[in-house]
Image: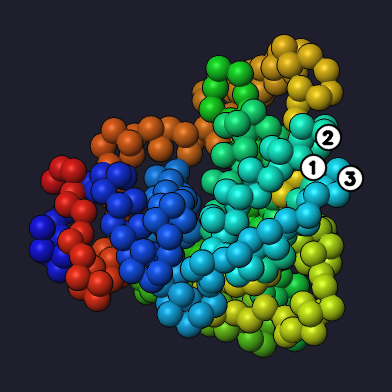
């Protein structure tokens, strides 16, 4: 179809992946890496993480244009006793996460758990996608990434610490994995970026303006700070991620660099991250682990006869299943971004699966 024309409808996941991968290959990324990033973005979109899905394609291309991502990184790692130090060499987050999982699985041959501390990692996007991949391979995984300073409490005169997202994934027998993904703010900055683009206000309690006063104006919030979930408790979680992702990965060179800066379109580059992988098989019987997981999650779901109790990851799995069958509906701003990229790179855009 004409890449400048879109009709109402649903876009096939495979076609979207092919389109995004083609764009990234035009920016000198190897085919396998481009497909890895594309699959991560499309899967994020499919599972409902739209602020970290296809709305990020434009900003990722911009960051490649600006040299903030390394399209052909020379990644390497060092295996320690119970840990791995992984140098991503500025790789895009999804590419680094793929290789981090591979390095961890190798290290787990000799260890029950492995903490991977990663340096110079690009924006990981939705952490849930990466911990999900680990859970689908049978592992428990917790992950976090350093972000630019974004959080403050009401009355603070400046942003105090990064929003520092945190996620975990865990396999469940005969069910989709548990996947919990949170930012340390009451709302991810991506929601505010999206609201500002669409001219919408934001709910009270999400953010303060640049003078520390509460605001519902998305544009003013972008110049101010995000409020942490649970107030001081959210700041504590952000500090934990800062220790594991930023301080453990620190080098003299990284300490000499300026703190990560905030881009208008979102996204970070060359920051720290951590991944903690645990092999349940190493701690005892897998059958006993599976039985315990089934017991407590089943009891949790049964706590509401009206269906109010839902496990984290359950909704995302349902959305992804629907998306694989029927395609993905894209918002008008995202369609506009992809149209412009299609024109720039002279690529056809994926036609809707159905109108």
Disc on the earlier residue, 3 or 1: 3
- Residue 114: image tag: 1
Specify whether 232 is left or right of 134: right
For residue 334, say whether it is visible.
no
Q: How many residues crowd around disc 1 within 10 Å: few (fewer than 14), some, or many (20 or more)?
A: many
Disc on the earlier residue, 2 or 3: 3
Specify whether 314 is left or right of 28: right
Q: Which residue is drawn at 66% across and 23% down?
A: 297
The residue lying furthest to the right in this view is 81
Q: Where is residue 200 in the image (x, y as percent from the top left)?
A: 40, 70
Give yes or no for contact between labels 3 and 1 (Cβ–Cβ under 8 Å): no
Q: Position of residue 265 (x, y in %)?
A: 47, 76
Q: Which residue is drawn at 48% across and 76% down?
A: 63
The Cα–Cα distance between marks 2 and 3, rounded to whole angstroms, is: 8 Å
Give yes or no for contact between labels 2 and 1 (Cβ–Cβ under 8 Å): yes
Q: How many residues crowd around disc 3 within 10 Å: few (fewer than 14), some, or many (20 or more)?
A: few
Q: How many residues crowd around disc 2 within 10 Å: few (fewer than 14), some, or many (20 or more)?
A: some
Give yes or no for contact between labels 2 and 3 (Cβ–Cβ under 8 Å): yes
* Residue 298 figure quarter: top right
Q: Which of marks 3 and 1 is in front?
A: 3
Q: Position of residue 223 (x, y in %)?
A: 57, 83
Residue placed under numbered mark 2 in the picture = 111
- Residue 203: image tag: none
The Cα–Cα distance between marks 3 and 1, rounded to whole angstroms, is: 9 Å
The Cα–Cα distance between marks 2 and 1, rounded to whole angstroms, is: 7 Å
Number of marks in the rendered image: 3
* Residue 113 figure quarter: top right
For residue 198, say whether it is visible.
yes
Residue placed under numbered mark 3 in the picture = 81
């Amino acid at each position: 179809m004409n890449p400048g024309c879109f009709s109402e409808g649903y876009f096939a996941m495979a076609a979207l992946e092919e389109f995004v991968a083609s764009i990234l290959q035009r920016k000198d990324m190897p085919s396998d890496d481009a497909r890895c990033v594309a699959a991560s973005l499309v899967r994020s979109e499919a599972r409902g993480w739209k602020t970290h899905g296809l709305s990020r394609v434009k900003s990722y291309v911009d960051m490649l244009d600006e040299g903030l991502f390394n399209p052909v990184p020379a990644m390497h790692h060092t295996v320690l006793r119970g840990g791995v130090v992984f140098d991503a060499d500025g790789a895009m987050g999804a590419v680094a996460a793929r290789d981090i999982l591979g390095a961890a699985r190798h290290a787990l041959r000799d260890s029950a758990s492995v903490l991977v501390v990663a340096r110079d990692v690009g924006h990981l996007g939705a952490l849930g996608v990466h911990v999900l991949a680990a859970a689908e391979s049978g592992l428990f995984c917790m992950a976090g990434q350093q972000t630019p300073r974004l959080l403050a409490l009401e009355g603070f005169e400046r942003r105090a610490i990064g929003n520092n997202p945190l996620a975990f994934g865990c396999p469940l027998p005969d069910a989709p994995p548990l996947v919990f993904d949170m930012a340390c703010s009451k709302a991810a900055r991506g929601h505010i970026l999206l609201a500002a683009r669409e001219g919408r206000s934001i709910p009270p309690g999400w953010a303060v303006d640049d003078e520390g006063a509460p605001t519902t104006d998305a544009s003013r919030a972008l110049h101010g700070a995000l409020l942490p979930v649970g107030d001081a408790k959210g700041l504590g979680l952000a500090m934990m991620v800062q220790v594991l992702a930023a301080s453990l990965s620190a080098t003299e060179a990284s300490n000499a660099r300026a703190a990560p800066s905030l881009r208008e379109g979102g996204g970070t580059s060359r920051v720290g991250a951590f991944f903690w992988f645990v092999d349940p098989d190493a701690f005892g019987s897998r059958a006993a682990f599976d039985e315990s997981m089934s017991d407590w999650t089943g009891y949790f779901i049964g706590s509401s006869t009206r269906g109010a109790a839902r496990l984290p990851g359950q909704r995302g799995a349902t959305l992804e299943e629907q998306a694989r069958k029927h395609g993905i509906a894209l918002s008008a701003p995202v369609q506009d971004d992809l149209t412009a990229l299609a024109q720039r790179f002279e690529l056809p855009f994926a036609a809707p699966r159905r109108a």
